[in-house]
Image: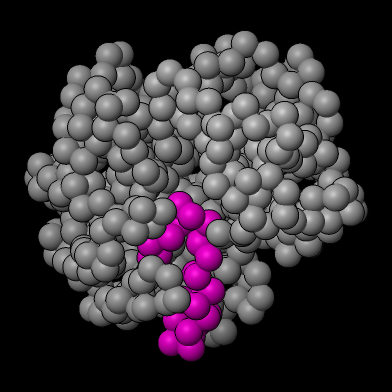
């Protein structure tokens, strides 16, 4: 009798599971049709969003950008989307309760980098759809790929699921910020609000929508991101007590100190003669690559094209003429001290013979695991003081620690499974060399898995003519609708 009962239970469980599979397949077929039907509306939504510019560094587009983000969330089905003020730019907290067993976190940014329209072939806020041979048709605009294009694809997925009359497979918790491009200085004030923390604690993980496909269709799954510190080093005659307190004639350099040279000499102490090794006293030590990470890099280096990478970055050589695999190991394992820009004195056409009273170096410092932003900043300040440059102001504008997520987390496993459904065998990668504030999710008190996901392709982040592919002429790269569908598949995979 017991055997019969067990057999019946097994049969019922099998039939139920098969029914669920067919139901999910029918759901996805209907949703895919809805994506096609809503293509023009989704592209228009992205174009309108690009036109709504928010640039934290220029204090441009606030609070309108946050209010626009909240409206986009509500339109996509979030029952509540609240603009939350911080000591900086406002953020948005939104929730979508589908009554599902699982909840997934979303990290969005609604701000973008600065731009000079004179450097663009297409106006950066008009988001024109242009031919981009041999890739197909692309939207060109600031924020097209970083990060509004992929985020708009995720929103389009939510519209399509609801438009097809289907129930969302997971609940969603969204945190959107407006200061990512200045180092997210106030995101803790957003994430650590009690109601936001309580919602995030229910999540299986947090992901940021991205366009992950290389030009050859290769996809890597990042298991983390480098941390970053963004700061300015300011040398001034007033603070130094030497040099002029205002710009003076350059002939007076014969008897007056130069704050600009003072800054240059300070910068020279931070790195080796070739600029490639950090020489800051007592700087935090990076964790060496593990054997598993080295194996990941070896595997990816055999598949990714070195020639294509050099062409994409417009470079002829890697540091120390390293071979491709070793260059990738260095990319993944090494912290950096980079000069983003030098500002001082006269920079207009022709010459102007002055002795500037002030000079500024804009610096970013990337961090790898086992390094803390606070420790790196403290070491920099102590180093400058010890070397006789204690007068130079160190003004940190933003930054945070690196992130790490394990490969066997549900978030990462679902990414790999989803990519395989699209015929892609993704490769694991130790960490993104760029940075995002995922530490607020992976660190205390949440300790969640976090990462990036999404098919599609775009490039030019932070640069002129930033683009995101809408109609793909490359069979290896998904068009916009394919990117939208990848998010649908991912949400259903996460629900399993």
Locate residue 85 relative to residue 182 in the image: left or right: left
Residue 251 percent across, percent down from the top left: 62, 27
Image point (68%, 45%), residue name: 243
Locate residue 246 relative to residue 373 in the image: left or right: left
Between 203 and 239, the one lying in front of the other is 239
Q: Is residue 475 magenta?
A: no
Image point (16%, 32%), residue name: 128
Image point (54%, 85%), residue name: 1
Between 49 and 112, the one lying in front of the other is 112
Q: Colour scheme in the image? A: one colour
Looking at the image, residue 347 lies above or below residue 216: below
Between 29 and 248, the one lying in front of the other is 248
Looking at the image, residue 485 lies above or below residue 404: above
Quarter location, residue 299: top right
Residue 207 percent across, percent down from the top left: 47, 58
Q: Decide if residue 212 is in sight here.
A: yes
Locate residue 30 relative to residue 478 in the image: left or right: left
Q: Is residue 198 magenta?
A: yes
Residue 72 percent across, percent down from the top left: 21, 63
Looking at the image, residue 128 lies above or below residue 391: above
Looking at the image, residue 144 lies above or below residue 96: above
Residue 219 percent across, percent down from the top left: 51, 34
Locate residue 326 relative to residue 458 in the image: left or right: right
Image point (87%, 48%), residue name: 387
User: Magenta residues?
Assistant: 175-202
Between 200 and 188, the one lying in front of the other is 188
């Amino acid at each position: 009798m017991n055997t019969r009962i067990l057999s019946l239970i097994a049969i019922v469980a099998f039939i139920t599971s098969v029914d669920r599979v067919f139901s999910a397949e029918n759901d996805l077929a209907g949703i895919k049709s809805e994506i096609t039907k809503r293509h023009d509306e989704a592209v228009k939504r992205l174009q309108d969003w690009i036109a709504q510019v928010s640039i934290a560094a220029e204090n441009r587009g606030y609070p309108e950008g946050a209010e626009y983000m909240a409206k986009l969330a509500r339109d996509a089905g979030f029952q509540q989307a609240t603009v939350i003020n911080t000591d900086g730019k406002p953020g948005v907290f939104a929730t979508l309760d589908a009554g599902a067993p699982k909840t997934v976190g979303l990290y969005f940014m609604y701000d973008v980098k600065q731009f000079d329209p004179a450097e663009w072939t297409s106006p950066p806020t008009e988001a024109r759809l242009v031919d981009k041979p041999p890739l197909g048709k692309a939207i060109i605009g600031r924020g097209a790929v970083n990060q509004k294009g992929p985020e708009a694809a995720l929103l389009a997925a939510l519209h399509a699921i609801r438009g097809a009359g289907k129930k969302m497979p997971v609940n969603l918790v969204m945190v959107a910020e407006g200061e990512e491009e200045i180092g997210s200085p106030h995101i803790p004030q957003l994430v650590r609000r009690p109601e936001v923390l309580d919602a995030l604690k229910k999540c299986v993980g947090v992901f940021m929508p991205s366009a992950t496909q290389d030009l050859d269709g290769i996809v890597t799954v990042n298991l983390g991101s480098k941390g970053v510190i963004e700061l300015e080093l300011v040398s001034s005659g007033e603070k130094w007590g030497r040099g002029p307190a205002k710009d003076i004639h350059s002939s007076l350099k014969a008897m007056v100190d130069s704050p600009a040279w003072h800054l240059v000499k300070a910068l020279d102490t931070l790195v080796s003669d070739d600029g490639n090794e950090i020489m800051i006293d007592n700087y935090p030590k990076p964790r060496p690559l593990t054997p598993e990470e080295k194996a990941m890099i070896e595997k990816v280096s055999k598949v990714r094209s070195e020639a294509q990478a050099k062409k994409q970055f417009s470079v002829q050589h890697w540091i120390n003429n390293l071979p491709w695999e070793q260059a990738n190991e260095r990319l993944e394992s090494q912290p950096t001290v980079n000069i983003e820009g030098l500002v001082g004195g006269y920079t207009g056409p022709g010459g102007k013979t002055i002795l500037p009273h002030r000079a500024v170096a804009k610096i970013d410092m990337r961090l790898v695991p086992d390094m803390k932003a606070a420790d790196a900043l403290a070491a920099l300040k102590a180093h400058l003081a010890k070397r006789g440059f204690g007068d130079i102001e160190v003004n940190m504008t933003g930054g945070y620690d690196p992130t790490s997520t394990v490969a066997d987390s549900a978030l990462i496993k679902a990414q790999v499974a989803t990519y395989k459904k699209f015929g892609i065998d993704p490769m694991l990668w130790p960490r993104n060399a760029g940075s995002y504030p995922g530490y607020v999710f992976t660190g205390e008190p949440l300790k969640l898995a976090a990462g990036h996901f999404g098919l599609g392709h775009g490039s030019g982040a932070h640069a002129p003519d930033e683009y995101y592919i809408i109609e793909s002429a490359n069979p290896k790269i998904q068009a916009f609708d394919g990117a939208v569908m990848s998010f649908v598949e991912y949400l259903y995979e996460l629900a399993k």
